[in-house]
């Protein structure tokens, strides 16, 4: 049996160039993937420090849920809903760090875990804003290249 072609493959015409990929999606999915790793290790550390407390498994389970949500949100970044969920995850992560600091008995050590959360919040903001700016510049360049290619094809005596 033959292989099924995707919609993009079916609509492709010879000489057609593909539009550039989104840098915003690339940056944002990278930040979310790294945050998933952060939440996994945070959950392990919080569980290890508090394994004899009643809330240890809740902290670990909650951090795993947030890590999985971060990875699943990467698939939604092609649509605006993905960025809304991403911002909500940033709030959940920072609130989770604060909540864990209030519940645990480690004193000043637990609030210091808030620093990576705030750092990743800044990375998320940068990825979304700068990625959108780079995407706009890339699309403008792509449009101009398409215009130039169309003009050079129609010029007499060339080709």
Image (spheres, rainbow, N blue to C red):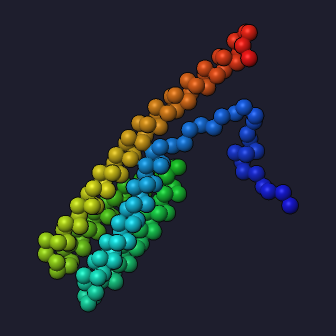
The spot of residue 66 in percent (x, y) is: 39, 68
Q: Residue furthest right?
A: 1
Asked if residue 100 shows in the view, the reply is: yes
Quadrant of res 60? bottom left
Position of residue 137 in the picture relative to residue 89 (left or right): right
From this view, report whether residue 75 is shown above or below residue 22.
below
Residue at 61% x, 20% y: name it. Answer: 148
Which of 62 and 50 lies nearest the eye of the viewer? 50
The spot of residue 68 in percent (x, y) is: 45, 68
Which of 131 and 80 lies nearest the eye of the viewer? 131
The spot of residue 88 in percent (x, y) is: 37, 58
Quadrant of res 157? top right
Q: Residue furthest left?
A: 107
Position of residue 24 in the picture relative to residue 50 (left or right): right
Q: Residue furthest bottom?
A: 52
From this view, report whether residue 111 is shown above or below residue 58.
above
Quadrant that contains the N terminus: bottom right
Asked if residue 55 shows in the view, the reply is: no
From this view, report whether residue 123 is shown above or below residue 56.
above
Residue at 48% x, 48% y: name it. Answer: 25
Exactly how many numbered labels are in the figure?
Answer: 0
The spot of residue 33 in percent (x, y) is: 43, 60
Position of residue 102 in the picture relative to residue 154 (left or right): left
Residue at 41% x, 36% y: name it. Answer: 133
Quadrant that contains the C terminus: top right
Residue at 27% x, 65% y: name it. Answer: 95
From this view, report whether residue 40 is shown above or below residue 145.
below
């Amino acid at each position: 049996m033959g292989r099924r072609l995707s919609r993009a493959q079916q609509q492709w015409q010879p000489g057609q160039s593909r539009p550039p990929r989104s840098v915003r999606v690339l940056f944002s999915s990278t930040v979310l993937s790294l945050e998933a790793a952060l939440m996994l290790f945070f959950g392990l550390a919080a569980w290890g420090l508090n394994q004899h407390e009643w809330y240890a498994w809740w902290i670990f389970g909650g951090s795993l849920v947030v890590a999985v949500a971060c990875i699943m949100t990467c698939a939604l970044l092609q649509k605006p809903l993905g960025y809304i969920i991403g911002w909500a995850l940033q709030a959940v992560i920072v609130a989770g760090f604060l909540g864990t600091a209030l519940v645990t008995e480690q004193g000043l050590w637990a609030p210091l875990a808030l620093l990576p959360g705030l750092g990743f919040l800044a990375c998320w903001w940068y990825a979304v804003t700068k990625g959108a700016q780079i995407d706009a510049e890339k699309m403008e360049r792509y449009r101009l290249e398409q215009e130039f290619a169309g003009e050079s094809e129609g010029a007499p005596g060339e080709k």
